[in-house]
Every structure is written in C-alpha cells, then in structure tokens.
Amino acid sequence: MTGTLPELIDDDVEKIEEIFRDFLAKAEADSVLLTAEGGFLVSEHGNTKKLDTMSLGALASNSFEANKAIAGLIGEPSFSSIYQAGETFSMYVQSIDGYNLMVVIFPVTTAVGAIKYYAQAARNEVAEVFAAARNRSPEGGLDLAMMNMADSSQIFRRK
C-alpha cells in the first residue's frame, strides 16, 4: 500500500533511530520528529521532553500541506521542504517519500544550511528503510488517517 506508513519491524525502527541519532549529532539540531500522512506522530528523537510533539507533528504537517497548495498556485509542482525561522528556535520540515515527513527543531545558532545538508542524507536513508519495508510487505502498512482513535488496539499491539 503506497501512501501509508509501511509495516516496520524492530530492525527498521532501530535503523531509523540510528539515522536520526546520527543526524542530530552531525546537524547540531535539538530534535527531529517523524510524522505520517495527516500529521500523526510516528517517532520522536532528541530533546523532546518540553515539546507537545503530537500537536507539533500535526501542525507541521498541516503547514507543509498548505505550502504544497501554495506551490501549485505559483505553478510549482511541489515543495519538498519548508523552513521557518524563529528568535530562539527554527523549524525545517522535509518530505521523506511524499507520505511522511521529518520535522527538525534547531536553535537559531545552528546554520540552516547544515540542517538542510544533513537532513537530505537522513531523508534518503529513512526513505530506503521505508522502501525495504514496503518491498518486504507490499500489502502491509498502516493508514493512520483511518485509525479509530477510540480503539487503536488493532494497530498497536504488544508482541
């Protein structure tokens, strides 16, 4: 199922955690969130304790979707990333595969060029993990937008 979060196994999750750990160290970013289509938070990495990561992921995803609409209005097929600068922290959002996003929070003292450079490498590596997961289970995957929020037990089960 394209357009969904692929069915990830423990090895996939560990690879993604390693990719983002490496990204945070190299880029000198504070945190990175992985969100699925619709803004559902898949994972969070780095200094996230003081963040409302669920709301942040949803809002960043909606902002990204709005910017895709703006791209269409100016004749651009798509924007693959957005950057928002703040006084203390900034945010960079990049599409991973057209269905999932990485949301990076970083201090303004960190150069956005470094964030973009290292984010592209991390994006490519996570996209490879997703592609391998899709190839392993082409009919698998989770459409989180269709999840019953009142009863997610069919999706999230203990092993």
Image: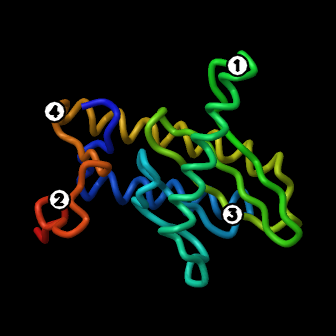
State the residue position of label 3. 105
Element marked by disc 1: loop
Instruction: Determine the CA span between mark 3 and mark 1.
Output: 26 Å
Where residue 72 appears, as percent x and y from the top left, is: 65, 22
The answer to which image quadrant residue 6 occupies is: top left
Instruction: Determine the CA span between mark 2 and mark 4.
Output: 15 Å
State the residue position of label 2. 155
Element marked by disc 3: strand
Where residue 14 appears, as percent x and y from the top left, is: 36, 59
Name which of mark 1 and mark 4 comes first in the sequence. Answer: 1
Name which of mark 3 and mark 2 comes first in the sequence. Answer: 3
Residue 139 got which mark?
Answer: 4
Instruction: Determine the CA span between mark 1 and mark 2.
Output: 37 Å
Question: In the current view of this chain or complex, which residue is farthest to the bottom?
Answer: 50
Q: Quadrant of the N terminus?
A: top left
Name which of mark 3 and mark 4 comes first in the sequence. Answer: 3
Marks 1 and 3: in contact by CB < 8 Å?
A: no
Q: Nearer the viewer, residue 7 or 16?
A: 7
> Residue type at mark 4?
Glu
Instruction: Determine the CA span between mark 3 and mark 4.
Output: 33 Å
